[in-house]
Amino acid sequence: MGIALGAGLAVLTGAGAGIGIGLATSKAVESIARQPEAKGDINKALLLGCALAEATAIYGFVIGLLIILFLK
């Protein structure tokens, strides 16, 4: 029971990453709407931020798998 609970909590990092990516995307769209000439710089920063946020979700998923597989 505890192992499943721990794995479930580890995988919840995906929810935080999803919220973060959604907020970053909305702010990037607002920024592009205000300054269309800065589109390239905004897109670069957005992609870097999304990659880092997604990496945290992947780390949580991997930790959840490791908990399930190795703590039986």
Image (spheres, rainbow, N blue to C red):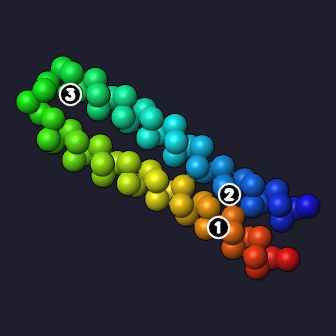
Counting residues from the N terminus, which is met first, the one under dot 1 or under dot 2? 2
Find the distance from the CA under tag 3 to the CA under tag 2.
Answer: 35 Å
Q: Amino acid at mark 2?
A: Ala
Label ID, residue 36: none
Height in image: 64 above or below 27? below
Mark nearest the camera among 1 and 3 is 3
- Mark 2 Cα shell of 10 Å, populated few (<14), some (14-19), many (≥20): some
Q: Which residue is mark 1?
A: 63
Q: Quadrant of residue 39?
A: top left
Q: Amino acid at mark 1?
A: Ile
If the image is split into quadrants, where does the C terminus sit?
Answer: bottom right
Counting residues from the N terminus, which is met first, the one under dot 1 or under dot 3? 3
Query: x, y (%) of residue 29?
Result: 29, 28
Query: x, y (%) of residue 65?
Result: 69, 69
Residue sitting at x 91%, y 61%: 1
Find the distance from the CA under tag 1 to the CA under tag 3.
Answer: 36 Å
Q: Is residue 51 left or right of residue 10?
A: left
Residue sitting at x 22%, y 42%: 43
- Mark 1 Cα shell of 10 Å, populated few (<14), some (14-19), many (≥20): some
Are circles 1 and 2 on residues that touch, CB within 8 Å? yes
Q: Quadrant of residue 66?
A: bottom right
Q: Which residue is mark 2?
A: 10
